Structures are given as C-alpha cells and as structure tokens.
Image (cartoon, rainbow, N blue to C red):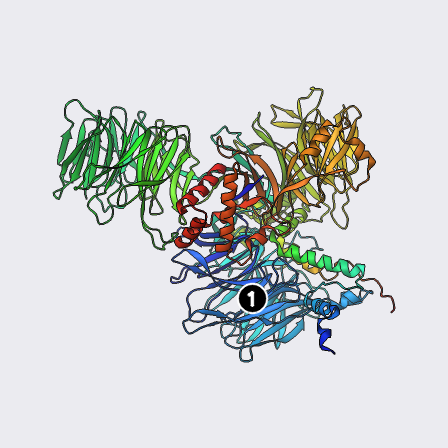
Amino acid sequence: MQASDRFNINSQLEHLQAKYVGTGHADLNRFEWAVNIHRDSYASFVGHYPMLAYFAIAENESIGRERYNFMQKMLLPCGLPPEREDD
Amino acid sequence: MYLYNLTLQRPTGVVCAVNGSFIGGSKSQEIVVSRGKSIDLLRPDESGKMQTIHSVDVFGAVRSLVQFRLTGSHKDYLVVGSDSGRIVILEFNKEKSAFDKVHQETFGKSGCRRIVPGQYLAVDPKGRAVMIAACEKQKLVYVLNRDTTARLTISSPLEAHKSHTIVYSVIGVDCGFDNPVFAAIELDYSEADQDSTGQAAEDAQKHLTFYELDLGLNHVSRKWSEPIDNGANLLVQVPGGGDGPGGVLVCAENFVIYKNQGHPDVRALIPRRADLPAERGVLIVSTATHRQKSMFFFLLQTEYGDVFKAVLVHKDDQVTELKIKYFDTIPVTSAMCVMKTGFLFAASEFGNHALYQFQAIGDSEDVEASSAMLNESDEVFVPVFFKPRGLKNLVRIDQVESLMPVMDLKVSNLFEEETPQIYTLCGRGPRSTMRILRPGLAVSEMAVSQLPGVPSAVWTVKKNVNDVFDVYIVVSFANATLVLSIGETVEEVNDSGFLDTTPSLAVSLLGDDSLMQVHPNGIRHIREDRRINEWRTPGKKTIIKVGSNRLQVVIALSGGELIYFEMDMTGQLMEVEKHEMPGDVACLDIAPVPEGRQRSRFLAVGSYDNTIRILSLDPDDCMQILSVQSVSSPPESLLLLEVQASVGGEDGADHPASVFLNAGLQNGVLFRTVVDMVTGQLSDSRSRFLGLRAPKLFPAIMRGRRAMLCLSSRPWLGYIHQGHFLLTPLSYETLEYAASFSSDQCAEGVVAVAGDALRIFTIERLGETFNETVVPLRYTPRKFVLQPKRKLMVVIESDQGVFTAEERENAKKECFEEAGMGENGNSNGDRMEMENGGGDEDEKDDSLSDEQYGYPKVGSDKWVSCIRVLDPRSGSTTCLLELQGNEAAFSLCTVNFHDKEYGTLLAVGTAQGLQFSPKRSFEACYIHIYRFVEEGRSLELLHKTQVDGVPLSLCQFQGRLLAGIGPVLRLYDLGKKRLLRKCENKLFPNSIVSIHTYRDRIYVGDMQESFHYCKYRRDENQLYIFADDSVPRWLTASHHIDFDTMAGADKFGNVYFVRLPQDVSDEIEEDPTGGKIKWEQGRLNGAPNKVEEIVQFHVGDAVTCLQKASLIPGGGECLIYGTVMGSLGSLLAFTSREDVDFFSHLEMHMRQEHPPLCGRDHMAYRSAYFPVKDVIDGDLCEQFPTLPPDLQRKIADELDRTPGEILKKLEDARNKII
C-alpha cells in the first residue's frame, strides 16, 4: 500500500464507516438506509425523556415499558431484509 | 420580534434519581434528581418534608446520574451522563451551596445519538472506575483516582466497544477490591440484518457480558459472556466482596435471574396481578437496593406499580434461593431511593412524587415466588398470582408536587381575583388532576378567631430577650387595646401592665426584659418587676408615629417634631435629642440593633412632601440628615431590612451584610434602595407595583432570616432564597396589619388582622412560584374549554386499554365479596388473611384506590372516556357523561350556530375503537352536539353525526362548525337530526390537529406539516389554502398571535413563530379572488405562498400547550407554555431595541463566561433542531447573580453598567411576566 492511499477518498470513507455507524456508501440499498434511520430514531426517542413520556401517554403504557419496546424494535426495525441478489 | 424566554416553573417530573451523601460531613443523606434539563438536590427535613436545597438549570438533557465515593472518603461525587458528548463529574460545594464541576472530559459529538455514550452510567462500587455507554456499540471506561493532594483524577478513556450490538443496561459488579468489573445486557444484530429468512433474527440472543478493567495493564477486556433470557431489560448490582455473593440480578420480562460468573442461574418468577391479561408480560421498571452491614434486599417495581422485595439466600458466594415477595403497590416510578434514615423516595413517572417511611421490611407473610418453586425442566411456568392491597410496609409522609405531564392549560380570571389563574390539566389515568395555579406562596391557616371590634393593629412580644417564643399578642382597636397571652390556648389577660383603655401605636420588648407600649399620649415602659414609667407628651401634642428597636425609640409628634430616646445602662428610657421636621411625619423606622453594637445608626423618616430622609442616630452627629431620597408618592410605611452577612449555611452562598430601605408608597409601589452602611447614602433604587393599596411593611422571620411582609391589596413576602431576594405574593386575602409569630406549635408564623378577625398562618414551601388547588379527574385529560360567563369548564378525558367504569365496579364488588367469604383464588393461601387482618373499612377502601394502584389493564382496543362539566370554584363535577362502547373523545369546542335556537352548544369529536398499531384504524367516528342545560351545569345530547375520520380538532367559524377530520377540513351547519356538510377541502397532507380562525382566515395545523393558512369564500362556498410552511413540523401545540402570525410547538421540543410576509398578506387581502387563482394553478407542491419563520427556540421539552396571557394586572401579554415534563415557561416580547441589545449582549457574555454545568454548549442546545432565532434565554441570564462577584463586575464592565444595574434589569424583566 502506498503512502498516498491513506489519504484518498475511499480510505477516508472506510475510516468514517468504521468509526460512525450509519455512514452511507455508494451501494447502500433502500432497506439498509431505512434500518439505519429507524435505529437512529429509536435511540433518539430513548435518549430524550420527554419524548418517551409523550409516547407513554399516547399508548397508555409506563415509560419503562416504552423504553424497552423501543430498544427491542432496534433489532428488526423494518422487518426482514430483502433477499440478496447474487453478485 | 424578539422574545425573552423565562421558565416560570422548572420541570417537576423526574428522569432519574440517586441518593448519597453529597454535602458530606454529617451522616445525612441527600437525593439528586435529574428533571431533564435541571438538576436538583433534595433532602427530607426533620419533619419528613422534602426540601429543595439547590436547583440548577444545566441547558442540556440529563439522561443518567450515578454517584460514587472514593475509598475512605465521606462525600459522594456525582457523574452526569447527558447529551453533551462529555462525561461530567460534579461535587457539591457546601460553601457556595452549588455544584462544582470537577472534571469534564469530551468523548464524542453532542446530542442524544445512537452511538455516543451518555445513556447509561455504571460505577465500580469502590469508586475506582466509571463506565459510560451508548444505546449501541460504544462503551468507555474512565479510571478514577486520587492525586497526592487528595484531589480526584480521571484517566483518558479506555474503549470497550462492540459493533452491531444494542445495549439494554449497564451496571458495576461488586467484586470487592479485585479488578473492577462491569456487566452489560447486549444484543448482537449483525446477522439478523443480513438474513432474509428471519432465522437469524429469531435466533438472536441477548447476552450478559462482563467487562473487566485490568488496573495493572490499564486495559478493558471482555471477561465473560453468556446467553440470558431474551426479555432481559435491567441489571441490579448484588453486594459482593464479603458483604454478599456478588454478581448481578437480571430483570427480564416475567423473571428475575441471579447470575454470576461460574455460578448456576437462579431464576424466579415475578408474581402477576390476578386481573392481568395473559398476553401481557411483567417488566421491572425501577429498582432500589437497601444495604446494611448484616443484610441487603432489593425493591423491584413493575410497570403496573407493584413493588416486590427480592432476597437472595446465600452462603458465602453460593446463592441457593431467590425469593420475590409482594411488598406494596405505589404509583409507577422512574426511580426509587432507599435512604439510610428509613425513607423511600419514589419519583413518580407521572403525577406527584412521594416520600414513604418504612413501617416494616416485608417480613410478614405475603405472596411469594421463589426459585425453589420453579422447575427448570417444565416447558410452561405456572404463574404466581396476587392481588394488590393497601400499603402495609410503607406509609406516605410527604408528597412533592409534579405537574407532569401538562396536557392543556388556559389562563383566565374566572374567580375575579387580582391576578388571573392558570388552569392546567395534568397527570395520567387515575392520577389525573385539574390544577388551578396561582402565582404566589401557599399559606396554611392555623387559626382564625373573631375579635370584639375591628382591630387596627397587632403585635407579638416576648417578655425576655432570651425567650424562644412570643408571650403576648397585643391587638389595638380604635379606642382600646387587647392583650392575649400565648400558651396552650390563646386567651385574654389583664395583668400584663399594658394600658387597655387607649389605642396603641407600638408594642415591643425593650432592653432585655421590659416591655414598651406607645399610645397617642405617651410611652408606657413596663419594667420586669412591674414598675411602670410613663412619659407623657408635652401640651396637647399627640404621638402619631413610632419607630423602635430593642434599645432605641423615636417618636414623631403631630406637627413634625421628632424625639429620640435611648435606653441607658440602668434600663431607663432617656430622651436624647429632639429634631423639628418641616412637616408632619408620614412614617419612620429604625433598623434592629446590629449584633455587638449599642445602637443602630440610621433612622429613616418619610414625609408627606414625597421624600424619605436618612437621619443619623450616632451621638456625634445625632439627628443630622445624611441623605434624602425623593419618591413618586408620599411614603406610607418604611422598613429597614438588614440582610445578614452569611457564609455558606443551608441555602446561602457568601453574602456581605447590607441594609435595604424599603418604602411602601401611597400609589401602591414598593420602593427599595440600598443604604450605604457607613455614609447612609442611598443608591441602586428599584420600584415595583404591588397592588392598589399603599403597602404596609412588617418584619418577619423566615427560615431564621429576616424577611419582609408587604400588605397591599394582597400580601407579599420579600425573602432570601438560595441567595436571591424574592418578592412573592401570598395566596391569601387582604390583610390590614401583621406581625411575626412564634409559639410552641408554630415556630415561624405570622399573626395578622383583617376585618374583625385575627388570623394566624404559616407560609410553606418557600421558593415556589405557584401554589396549587387540585381537583382529581378520572381519566387522562385531553382538552378543555372554559365558559367564562358561567364560570364552568368542560373537560374531555380518555384512556386506552382500560375496563369501563361498570366493569371496574363489578370487579371491585366481586373482590369485596370474595374477601367477605374468605375465599381465595390464590395458590399461596396467605393473601386473604392479611387483607382481612388489616381490619377497618378505611384500609379496604384504600386497598382498591385506583390512584394508588392504577386501572387494571386490558387489550389496547378498549377505550374509556368521559365528558365532565366542572365547577372550578368548588371543585365539584356538575355533570359527568361516560361514553359507551369503546368511544373516546379527542376534541371539543363551544359553538354558536347561526340560528340562535339553542344558544351556545358543545361539539365533541370522538372515535370508536381507535387503534394506533399496526396502522391507525377505527370502527367509527362521530361529532356529538350537546346542549347546555341547567345554566350550563349539565349537558344534553342533541345528536351525533358520523364522520369518516378522527375529528382531532373543532372550531367555530362564522356561525358554523369547522372540523378537522383526518386530512379533511370540513364546514358543518346545524341540522335537526345531524350536522350538515357545507363545504370541504381535502388537500391537507396528514391529519388536522388544530384550527384557529380570525376574520375570514382559518389557520390549520397539520400533525406533521406545520401550519396552513386558509380562506373561506362565502360567495363561492369554497375553502382554499393560500399559504403554508416549508418546514415539516410535528405540531403538538399552536396558538394564534395576530392576523399573519401563528405560534407553534413541535414534539421535539421547539417553539416557533411563523408569519406571512406583509406584502403577501396585503396582496391576498386586496386580490378580489383572494389569491384563489394562484391556488387553482397548482403549480407548486402545496400552497402558492410560504410563511416565514420569525422565531425559533429549543425548549428541550415537548411543549403541549400554548396560551397568550398576562399574568400580572396591567402587564403586557406573553406566551405561556406547558410541557410534558410538567414545567411552565413564558415568552415575552421585548418592547425596546435597547433592551434587546442589552439582553443579547448579556446572554453572549454569560455563554462565554459561564458555560452550562453539564458541558453542553448553550447556543448549540437552544439550536438543537433548528438554529435559534430572535429569542434570548432569560434562564441563562438569570444565572448572573450566581457568578462570583469579580466575574459579575467583569461582565458588567463590558456592558458599561454596574452589576446592580444588571440585577435590576433582570428583576424588571421577570416582573413584567409574573
């Protein structure tokens, strides 16, 4: 590997992708994008307590239950992934 | 438009709480609570009332708190996990009575993000390391240590990241002085994301992972990882290292599992409520641990509010049994703290928090599930059932009020008081309330007694300077004086030595043990041995005013002559000096004798020529005029209030002593100015309008400090709270004359006269802005309307997933019957005994109180709802209509239709069988029209009209009814049997949540897409949208400001104003088609015109209601908002450019010199979603007085002002609002 490779755009991107979850790439498909957005949203709901409380009032559940539900939904936020096309 | 944001009531809900010894030194324990954007330090006082010792706004979202203590230390530090991307360690500084930032380490971006730590905090029990974790991937460990000077040090972070892993909970494992270990519940999703068959997702397994920090290698490694129940959500630390077996309790849905490395799992079921539907799980939502040297137990609370006591039976490190026993039921908490003093602080998720005292620790018989009962080989576990009962182990001793959540608020002066009341709907489910908030302090009346005449004045007096309590209450009438002695009861006495055939002007203790009565014709000095010295006025002159302290007396005779007396060594009152004033004296006052001095130096004299003079009482320059102050109106009453120098202490930081001259002027203004202690010069004057009557000023004692009572058309109290001087109205009737009162039953009270009654009261909860009157409601309140003429309100309440009132009633009856027959549906067979054992009827009632234990849950397809007509004055419900058949009310408005046949009608929008998931669906929706009968006290259904969407908003418009039905805006007219459709517009994007009208404009708020401005053309009978917003906003509240402007709030916690540009507005109004042609062209996506955002501000809390109102008489209007976390705030429009400049500069300097405590950048916080625009944060500016004096001076210099002027500006700004 040449020294200059370290600074080209691809390796910089790779670095970002490794460091920040959810950094996109050229081949990102619709599903992956949506999954990422949903996880970000759920994490934000869990992080902002007033938001959790707001949902808890709407659904008439306890705040603790809402938090748990959101965390659980982070596993498969958009249902099953689509079948992979063979490459 | 520039606005000034000021929080009126800090958030009252609690996000998380920890207890520890933060003040240090004594054995006392304090609780630190995070209220979202502020941190409070609380402590129960001797009488078991929770007191707020310190409260600070941090301008960030505090998500987690944890306390730790370095070994050998006696003081806890506080670690804060927030949205700042930083870890912050705070220490409470006793001297300053404030939190000091000890360390602040940056590790990531700011904001509540998925992979930026801050969500979870865990600390090693020995205080050697802290772990801060995010919802996903990142975990950082900081090593804590002490340097050579015993200061806390923090290392650089050690990473314990794991990609594609969701974290549910993190805790420190107690392993004594071995290497620190942290445990985490983790779930790896990497395979589930790839596998389209769903097999991997099904197989996804939560793991309990131990991370070990090797202190020698300075490295964190994954030590151990083992699969756990997939319902796991919470970890609890188990004492270890000699005190217990160590390891963790894993709380999962329906189970609690003890786990430790190299130890078999010990699993026990969580008992279920008998009435809980089978498909619902039981989740632990909050926990508390009680630790003593010899024993420990855990309190685990479920999402339904039941508290269980978990006990581990262990021998050394081997746990043989885990027992989970029903303890008590209290409202669901967000955090619980067990204190060493035997208190349990329960911070409720919604509604008031409570402080409980332990009566027992659950040792008696009760429903119990044990690990021994559970057969691991069974496929299906047999559930253990119990029924909630009344409190047995806990007894509630105090409540801390919480408005959380504020669902709706309106400001109105229904009671025709001096200031309007704020009507708020708060709480959820059975703990819902309507609260009437009045600015001011709550007063608790201790006694009211009628007197034989109309008294003019009242004093309290001690017999000896060393007495703790007052001995006499002296009441003066127009021609007599009445003396009452204070003992077990208050009764009249005649042997006091006071002259009772004359009115009195002053009564006080003189010297060490003699009494003085000043009456119009002289001074009566009653010595301790009952000798009486009388001084008589010369000639026909009478005394008109008196000022005195313990050693000095000054009287003013008619004509303007002042005579000054001083007490000599022998206890004789000697005339010292005379002085002729130019005219009659209006009022005078002498400050109390300062500690260690012989006399007070200043005499303040107010004259009818609108001046106040300060005269010297020093022997060298006796009765020399030191300074003169002219005021706007003749002074009525004067009070020299000395603020004692204080260093540290309960609530005060360092304050140099200072003397304030307070004057109540005849035009109702209170005038305050600082008196220079040496020269007597007056400076830094402030005035404030208190009421329609001239304020009379009286000294009082509050929390051991001098305070001031001001009696105008309503009473006010001026006192020092947490280092600030506050002037707050009391919620009490008009008083004539007052004196401080101290007796056995009441240490710091006030005795006052008003009308022909003598009143004794105390003032509670100093420092609070509002006092509350509470009216309980049945279900979660949604909205309400006021009927100002009839002084009534109509509230709609609805709850999802609850049995109807009848079903609940039946269930209750069954329960009672069952109890009566002594039957028992429970396998354990011990429950009934204790329920009957409680005995009396009260307890039984309590046992089934919905407020305490919540409504039983059913499936989410069930709804209950009611419409209530409430008389706020008496708090009584005059009409309650329970909706039937799964119908729930969502909107209401009053409407006057064209034909005045019925007068004002009530329209209520309802939905039947509404479901939110998987997709919003309903069986049917209706608009009910009710007629008011019995003068508005009752409702009668006229008819109901089925509609094709959920009517989330209703509004009257030109004698018709506008309804937002899903995405359709429709205009209805009243028919005989139903509403008649007149006109509609279907072009709204999602769902209409608010409608406001003004003239022919209609301002429609969409659930996701902000405001749409519409017009109705009567000639063509058409509704069309002529302008909308370009920003998607998830509206939660809206308010109409003016013809072109709307205020809105979104659910992310922003408040914003949009305005239609002036030229566009003019064009629309001038255009004969009203912009319709442009609309019909439909070239753009959406409306042809766009509104502009003119104000933007991040409140940091979901705003649920907005209301324009003026909270003070004669004050300008401001926008009041209420939030989910139970706070109230206001936005006041600046009226001068000068003020805008001043406050924006002050805010800028405050941002630089005093960055927020938890490390979040203030500007970034207020711009969290959209850049802040034209709003100055008064909450930050109001932190100016908490800065050290040199910093205050520095900022003041930059602003070309003095610190005093800045304080005055801040006070003025606040006084404009409240």
Q: Taking B807 as reference, is B87 left or right?
A: left
Q: Is residue B647 visible?
A: yes
Protein chain holding label 1: B
Q: Taking B559 as reference, is B1210 left or right?
A: right
Q: Is residue B666 above or below residue B1050?
A: above
Kindly indicate the quadrant of the structure image that contains residue A76.
bottom right
In the image shown, does B904 or B329 lie closer to the viewer?
Answer: B904
- Name the outermost residue toward the bottom: B216
**Residue B113 spot, x, y in % from top left:** 64, 59
Q: Is residue B337 above or below residue B664?
A: below
Residue type marked 1:
Ala
Q: Taking B18 as reference, is B270 left or right?
A: right
Mark 1 highlights which residue? B122
Classify mark 1: residues with Cα within 10 Å, few (<14), some (14-19) or many (20+): many
The secondary structure type at the circle numbered 1 is strand
**Residue that appears at 75% across and 59% down:** A35
Q: Is residue B473 visible?
A: no
